[in-house]
Every structure is written in structure tokens, then in C-alpha cells.
Image (tube, rainbow, N blue to C red):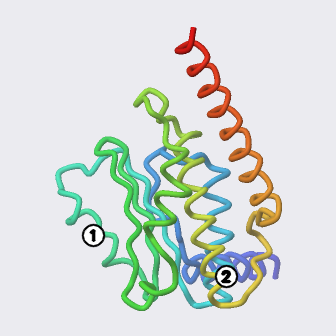
């Protein structure tokens, strides 16, 4: 009786793992475990609530393939509608690939330039798993937020959104500080010129 119960539990576990989706398609030690675990959980929630599959690939290099061939090898594995966040460290390539129906859901260039690029380290030596995890996760979370906004859903596992009022106030303070610095610079320059 006990052995039959063990077999039943093992069979159930095997069946569940067969049908579970892996959204981090490949990670060649580029992302830390906490990041990949979080991405799996959030991708599962996005898929459950919208039917959109959000995949991640983080490679050391492209091996013997060119970029298009490598990307296509992963696109052959994904389910549509999809978003694939693709990274290759050696080639310094980051792409956001989408199925045609996802083209209108969010602006890929905005995600790339506003949420990924600002966190990319300047030096190759700083391309550590922690830093790679930071910039890819930042872009990834922004993609999930944009999908959630478009589909009018709430994601329980996402990061809390920044308060828009705080962002506006911070931006205004920075502009005021910059203006004061420019005025001081102009005043000092004109004063020295007149002496």
C-alpha cells in the first residue's frame, strides 16, 4: 500500500513537471538563481493571466552560430504569443524578440533604452552575474508591467510601481538644480571676463 502511494506521488510529480513551462530557456551562469526563480514565477503569472509567454535566454556566447541563427533556434521552442529577452555576453547583444501580435503591446526600444541600457556596466570586467541579472531583470519587469497595463491586470509577484508623482517631483528638483548650476556658472564666467 505504501509503495503504491509513493508510486502515485512520483507519477503525479512527473506529470506536473512534464506540463510545467520553463520560461528561462537557457542560463549559462549569466543570471543568479534568485533572478531566474523570480523570472519563472512572474512569467508563469503573466502566462496564466494573459496567455502571453515571456521567455529569457542568457548566454555566455553564441557558440558556432551567428546571432540570427541562435535566436531562431530558441524561437523554434517558444509558444506564441511570446516575448523573448535574449542576451549574449561575449557578443554584447541584447534583443527583445516578439511574436507579431505582441508588436503593438509595448515599445521594445523604450524598454531597452530606458530600463536596460542605463544599468549596463561600462567595463567588461563588471559584467558579473549580479550586474547582468540587474539590467536584464529591470527590462524584464518593465515588460511585464507594460503587458499588465495593456491587459488591465494586476501582477501579484511584480515589483511595486514607482509613484508617478515622486518621479515628477524628482525630475523637477533635478532640473531646478541644473538651472541653478548653469546660472552660477554663467555668473562666474561673466564676472571673470569683466575683471
- Quadrant assignment, res 185: top right
Looking at the image, residue 60 lies above or below residue 69: above
Mark number, residue 93: none
- Image position, residue 169 (x, y; %): 80, 56
Residue name at image x 54 percent, y 80 percent: 18
Graded by Cα atoms within 10 Å as few (under 14), some (14 to 19) or many (20 or more), the crowding at tag 2 reads: some
Estimate the spatial distance between the alpha carbons at disc 2 and disc 1, rounded to whole Å: 28 Å
In the image, taking residue 124 as reference, residue 116 lies left or right, namely right
Q: Residue furthest top?
A: 195
Query: Could you say whether the residue bearing mark 1 is in a helix, strand or loop?
Result: helix
Mark number, residue 148: 2
Looking at the image, residue 105 lies above or below residue 163: below
- Image position, residue 142 (x, y; %): 61, 66
The residue tagged 1 is 73
**The C terminus, quarter of image:** top right
In the image, taking residue 125 as reference, residue 133 lies left or right, namely right
Q: Nearer the viewer, mark 2 or mark 1?
A: 2
Dot 2 or dot 1: first in sequence order is 1
Residue name at image x 33 percent, y 52 percent: 93
Q: Nearer the viewer, residue 6 or 28?
A: 28
- Image position, residue 133 (x, y; %): 57, 48
Q: Nearer the viewer, residue 180 or 83?
A: 180
Residue name at image x 26 percent, y 71 percent: 72
- Image position, residue 145 (x, y; %): 66, 73
Query: Could you say whether the residue bearing mark 2 is in a helix, strand or loop?
Result: helix
Amino acid at each position: 500500500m505504501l509503495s503504491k502511494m509513493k508510486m502515485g506521488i512520483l507519477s503525479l510529480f512527473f506529470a506536473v513537471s512534464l506540463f510545467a513551462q520553463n520560461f528561462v530557456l537557457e542560463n549559462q551562469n549569466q543570471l543568479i538563481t534568485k533572478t531566474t526563480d523570480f523570472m519563472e514565477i512572474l512569467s508563469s503569472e503573466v502566462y496564466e493571466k494573459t496567455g502571453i509567454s515571456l521567455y529569457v535566454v542568457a548566454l555566455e556566447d553564441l557558440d558556432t552560430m551567428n546571432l540570427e541563427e541562435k535566436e531562431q533556434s530558441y524561437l523554434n521552442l517558444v509558444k506564441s504569443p511570446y516575448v523573448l529577452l535574449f542576451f549574449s555576453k561575449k557578443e554584447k547583444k541584447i534583443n527583445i524578440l516578439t511574436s507579431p501580435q505582441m508588436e503593438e503591446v509595448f515599445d521594445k526600444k523604450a524598454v531597452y533604452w530606458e530600463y536596460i541600457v542605463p544599468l549596463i556596466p561600462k567595463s567588461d570586467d563588471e559584467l558579473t552575474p549580479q550586474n547582468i541579472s540587474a539590467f536584464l531583470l529591470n527590462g524584464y519587469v518593465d515588460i511585464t508591467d507594460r503587458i499588465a497595463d495593456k491587459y488591465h491586470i494586476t501582477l501579484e509577484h511584480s515589483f511595486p510601481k514607482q509613484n508617478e508623482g515622486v518621479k515628477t517631483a524628482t525630475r523637477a528638483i533635478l532640473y531646478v538644480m541644473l538651472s541653478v548650476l548653469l546660472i552660477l556658472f554663467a555668473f562666474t564666467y561673466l564676472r571673470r571676463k569683466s575683471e
